[in-house]
Amino acid sequence: TTQTIPSGSWTPLNWNNEIFDGDDVHSTVTNSSRVIIPSSGTWTFGVQATFQTSAANLVYIRIIEGTTAASTVIVEDNRWAQVDNTRIVINGIQHFATSGSTITVNVLSGGSTNNILANTLRFWGHRISA
């Protein structure tokens, strides 16, 4: 479904459906904005989202380890979004010494309220080494 992103505050993205989750790292029912790292090691992550903007403004997206504003930022990017649909894709790599870390993706609208278009939100994560 379309998710509204208010202006001026970081908002976690909700992952309301799954295509594949072989390691059971996500729940669409409980804490749908979170991905839990099941094992230690180095992981690569990526996100794709399409912003639907009502006015040209900056939009920000970041992958973080944690659930608060003080969390560790793994990767962050921003784009000047025109009045239309603006797609952003980001990728990052992070090493986790233990299992159980929480990953969230947050977005921020620097101007007017925006939407993330339905069926355009994608997240992927893969363990690439121990």
Image (cartoon, rainbow, N blue to C red):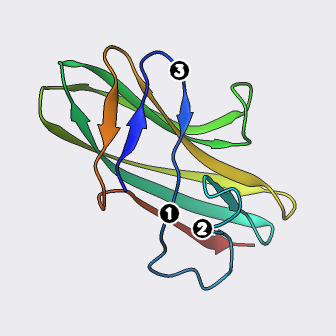
| Residue 57 relative to residue 25: left or right | left
* Residues packed near mark 1 inside 10 Å, few (<14), some (14 to 19) or many (20 plus): some
At x 67%, y 51%, the residue is 103
Q: Position of residue 45 (x, y in %)?
A: 53, 58
Residue 14, placed above or below residue 86: below
Which residue bears the numbered disc 3? 9
Q: Quadrant of residue 52?
A: top left
Q: Is 60 placed left or right of 36 in the picture?
A: left
* Quarter placement of the N terminus: bottom left
Q: In the displayed structure, does residue 5 sit left or right of residue 102?
A: left
Residue type at numbered disc 3: Ser
Compare marks 1 and 2 and give the one earlier in the sequence: 1
Horizontal side of 12 relative to 67 (left or right) equals left
Q: Classify mark 2: helix, strand or loop.
A: loop
CB within 8 Å, label 1 to label 2:
yes
Task: Give the vertical position of 15 relative to 116 (above or below).
Answer: below
Alpha carbons under labels 2 and 3: distance apart = 23 Å
Q: In which quarter of the image is the C terminus?
A: bottom right
**If you read the primary sequence from the N terminus, does the residue marked by circle 1 or circle 3 appear first?**
3
Which amino acid type is marked by label 1? Answer: Asn
Q: Which residue is drawn at 40% across and 37% down?
A: 4
Which disc number belongs to residue 75?
Answer: none
108 is higher (above) or lower (below) than 48: above
Three-letter amino acid code at disc 2? Answer: Thr
Q: Which residue is drawn at 78% across and 56% down?
A: 96
Residue at which label 2 appears: 28
Q: What SS does tag 1 mark? A: loop
In percent of width and height, residue 106 lies at: 53, 38
User: Residue 95 appears in which quarter of the rendering?
Assistant: bottom right
Q: Which residue is labeled 1 in the image?
A: 16
